[in-house]
Image (cartoon, coloured by chain):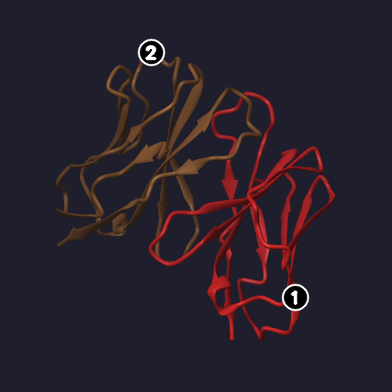
Amino acid sequence: DTEVTQTPKHLVMGMTNKKSLKCEQHMGHRAMYWYKQKAKKPPELMFVYSYEKLSINESVPSRFSPECPNSSLLNLHLHALQPEDSALYLCASSSPGYSYYGYTFGSGTRLTVV
Amino acid sequence: AQKITQTQPGMFVQEKEAVTLDCTYDTSDPSYGLFWYKQPSSGEMIFLIYQGSYDQQNATEGRYSLNFQKARKSANLVISASQLGDSAMYFCAMREGITGNTPLVFGKGTRLSVIA
């Protein structure tokens, strides 16, 4: 299995809702990432988990709450989002060792906040 | 400071022609990796090609080749024999260091349009 699976593919939520994005991989990768991508812009790093521990938080607002319950699963919990948080959210994984093809991306979740 | 620079917001190429997408980078780390990804309108990031900073030869993967000029800090992507399906956004990205748990940093991207 050489995939990163993200669910749901599309999500529409109100500003008072709580929702979660899910990312799963079974490649044995021990580093996982959340990126946010606005339209016509490059992906911007949000969080990095290495060996299930949060190693990088790029000053993301607390309405985004990541969680890595095990080595295969990465969640992004969303609460009280703003319309400007509407974007494509990409999950990626990699092997922490020296690896060149190590970064695998999911197909993303398109989030719309209304 | 911007680490990855892609100066071509958009490019057009005739079908079956070759096209070069430019990428320059900046790092003080002697160990780094350079990547090119293709992103169609569906949103998925598709890995195309990789070049390590210590690799002596330019990377090639099928119709994709990477023109790596280390002294100039450039890593241009060459797509030969363009196809209509090559129309997409192309991102150059870099990982500093040699460990695989360092995040990728992306350039702003180049939108390639292939014309029949």
Residue B44, given in percent of the width and then of the height, sits at 50, 58
Q: Please identify the quadrant where the N terminus of chain B is shown.
A: top left
Q: Residue B19 shows which numbered tag?
A: none
Q: Nearer the viewer, residue A1 or B21?
A: B21
Secondary structure, mark 2, is loop
Residue A91, given in percent of the width and then of the height, sits at 63, 54
Q: Nearer the viewer, residue A91 or B60?
A: A91
Return the chain for callout 1: A
Q: Quadrant of residue B50 in the image?
A: top left
Return the chain for callout 2: B
Q: Are marks 1 and 2 in contact (CB under 8 Å)?
A: no
Q: Please identify the quadrant where the C terminus of chain B is shown.
A: bottom left
Q: Residue at x 68, y 26 (%)?
A: A97
Observer-side mark, 1 or 2, equals 1
Which amino acid, by three-letter code, is at mark 2? Gln
**Chain identity for the colour brown used in the image:** B
Residue A34, given in percent of the width and then of the height, sits at 64, 53
Determine the colour of chain A: red
Which residue in the structure is indicated by mark 2? B56
- In the picture, measured across the screen, residue B80 lies left or right of residue A88, that is left
